[in-house]
Image (cartoon, grey):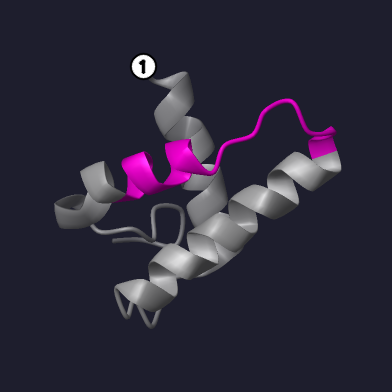
Amino acid sequence: MSRNNPIPVRLRDKFKAHMEANDFDDLPDGAWFANLETAAQQFIDKHHLRFADNNSAAHQYIRMLEST
């Protein structure tokens, strides 16, 4: 886990599935990213990731998409 990748490796598959379920790419860009941040915060709260922040987690998800 790092600042740029706040979601631990052991949770990345669950995180990606959670984010994909909340990835409504038909929204305008600002609303789309805000939605990703909200979904990331829900995941962070559910898994008690105290040092993760939703903005970095949303960017981590986008990087995950770009690498596939």
Q: Residue at x 61, y 61 (%)?
A: 38
Q: Is residue 66 above or below residue 14?
A: above
Three-letter code, disc 1: Thr
The picture places residue 6, in percent across and down from the top left corner, at 39, 61
Q: Nearer the viewer, residue 56 or 46?
A: 46
- Is 50 situated above or below 2? below
> Is 65 left, or right, of 36 in this rendering?
left
* Side of 43 relative to 48 (left or right): right
> Where residue 12 appears, x then y in whole percent?
26, 47
Residue 17 shown in magenta: yes
Name the residue that disc number 1 marks: 68
What residue is shown at x 56% (from left), y 64% (from top)?
54
Where does the N terminus fall, quadrant-wise? bottom left
Tell me residue 34's x, y (percent). Answer: 73, 53
Location of residue 48 (image quadrant)? bottom left
Q: Bounds of the magenta span?
A: 15-29
* Relative to 20, residue 1 above or below: below
Where does the image place residue 52, in percent across and percent down from the top left? Answer: 43, 71
- How busy is the neighbourhood of tag 1: few (under 14 within 10 Å), some, or many (20 plus)? few
Q: Residue at x 62, y 57 (%)?
A: 37
